[in-house]
Amino acid sequence: MDTALTKMLGIEYPIIMAPMFLVSNTKMIIAALESGITGAFPALNYRTDEEFRDAIDEIRSKTDKPFGVNLIVNKSNIKFETQLKTCVDKKVDFIITSLGSPEKTIAECKPKGIKVFCDVVDEKYALKVEKLGADAIIAVNKEAGGHAGDIGYKELIPLLTKSCSIPVISAGGVATANQLEEMLMLGATGVSMGTVFIATEESEVAEDYKNALIKYGAKDIVRTSNLSGTPLTVINTPYLQEVGTEPSWLQKTLMKRKWLKKYVKMFIVLKGMKSIEKSTFGASYKTIWVAGPTIEDIHEVKPVKEIVEGLVGTL
């Protein structure tokens, strides 16, 4: 297939295996690349810069096909400067920026030929990152898993393709060939998809997590502000119903005090990420599983290659 995304990266199909916090691993990325698509993983999945560099080297030792890294570019990521330097040193093919201004990332990467794709949720921010020199925008719609947007893909994709002159990659709402085709017909140059790849043989999450993706459906996806400081889509398990989806009364009260807000938010994030990590890799009744509404279309665990073949077989 020829789209702006396939031409830009030199890939067969216009699909990015989306970077997923804790979930993405080198096996998944390698399998994606060898299936004709590309993939990215969060730099924050690795605790040290050495581990991060080793992951890049491992992928490169198995394939010469293009892959990317997701960077959190706001002040909450104290490792940003080091991670950006590693990406530039290692000359990764592209970077996906999230939660902040991509200005420094674009300035550092452009001279090295590294593409920069920026997560956006609305027209205003899309125009801003285009002006800064982004190579493409990733339109995160409200059907996305994890940190979703507030605008549905049927509105967001046409809006951004009309307003912006750089390629628009849609994120959210794709697990089948028909859904992929719909995004392309709406004007997207490709898609970034994550949830469906959690339930793969290459994924190393707990079997309970994979089984939950099969057991639950779109109606079971809810947003919670009690885990990462910003709304996050998760499966509405009995434990989540027990603890609720909003910060406690005490946390809300403390956050009203300007000088305390930053620290309360950091506490929520640290506590929430620990809960997610325990649920992702171990069995516990305190289950918090991140996913998007496309779990409706997950019916079994498959190899990455089989999922890709199902997505592109009729195109």
Image: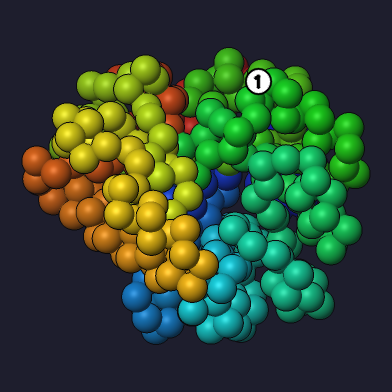
- Whether residue 304 is visible: no
Q: Residue at x 14, y 44 (%)?
A: 286
In front here: 128 or 31?
A: 128
**Rendering quarter of residue 129:** bottom right
Q: Position of residue 167 (x, y in %)?
A: 80, 43
**Residue type indicated by callout 1:** Glu
**Image check: 238 left or right of 85?**
left
Q: Residue at x 49, y 73 (%)?
A: 259
179 relative to 7, above or below? above
Vertical position of residue 124 compared to residue 277: above or below: above
* In this rendering, position of residue 212 left or right of residue 133: left
Q: Quadrant of the N terminus?
A: top right
Residue in the foreground of this view, choosing between 179 and 119: 119
Q: Please state the horizontal and vertical placement of residue 141, each as a whole percent of the image.
A: 61, 33
Q: Residue at x 65, y 30 (%)?
A: 151
Examine the rendered structure and indicate whether residue 155 appears above or below residue 247: above
Across and down, in percent, residue 315 comes to 64, 20
Q: Position of residue 281 (x, y in %)?
A: 19, 52
Label 1: how many Cα within 10 Å (few below 14, some 14–19, many 20+):
some
The answer to whether residue 190 is seen in the rendering is yes
In percent of the image, x 42 and y 75: which residue is there? 52
Work out whether 95 lies above or below 13.
Answer: below
Instruction: Read off the residue under disc 1.
Output: 181
Tally of marks: 1
Which colouring convention does the figure follow?
Answer: rainbow
Q: Secondary structure at mark 1?
A: helix
